[in-house]
Amino acid sequence: MPGLFSGTSFEQPVTCAVCEKILDDCICPRDADGNSCPPADQPARVRREKRRGKWVTVVTGLDPAATDLKQLAKQARAACSAGGSATDDGIEVQGDHRDKLVQMLKEKGYPAKPAGG
């Protein structure tokens, strides 16, 4: 993408609107379209489901392109001392850990809310 006044002596590189660094040096999370998508703009919903007679806690609402779901799932498993995985839609953790995951996501800057009953 060319910068402002491209090809002139006043040429300026394209910068990030959030951190104001050159786009090549920017580390802000971005969605699939390339727009900035910080954790505060990703409303996470944490619900629990019963599958095959056992509880599973499911986190949805996270942008898979802007969030490292595998790393976040690893941190969630460690916080809950349980198994789980990252899926295309979000994160699944074995057991009923809804309150712990809501608290963990809020500490990381996500506006997380418990969903369901």
Image (cartoon, helix red, strand yellow):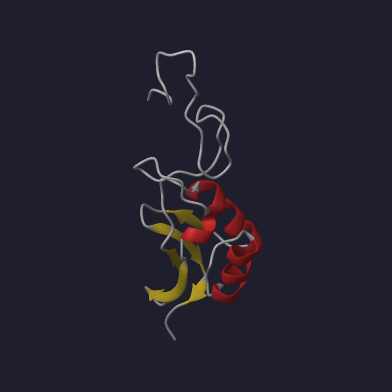
Q: Nearer the viewer, residue 80 or 12?
A: 12
Quarter holding the N terminus is top left
Residue at image coords 53%, 67%: 111
Q: Nearer the viewer, residue 68 or 109?
A: 109
Residue at image coords 41%, 75%: 49
Residue 57 in view of the camera = no
Measuring from the top left, give residue 15's x and y in whole percent: 51, 33
Q: Nearer the viewer, residue 83 or 31?
A: 31
Measuring from the top left, give residue 53's x and y in whole percent: 40, 77
**Residue 45 in the image: above or below residue 115:** above
**Residue 47 in the image: above or below residue 59:** below
Measuring from the top left, give residue 29's x and y in whole percent: 50, 44
Residue at image coords 60%, 66%: 106
**Residue 29 in the image: above or below residue 89:** above
Answer with the quarter of the image where residue 5 lies.
Answer: top left
Quarter holding the C terminus is bottom left
Measuring from the top left, give residue 84's x and y in whole percent: 50, 58
Total marks placed: 0
Residue 28 in view of the camera = yes
Give the farthest residue toward the bottom: 117
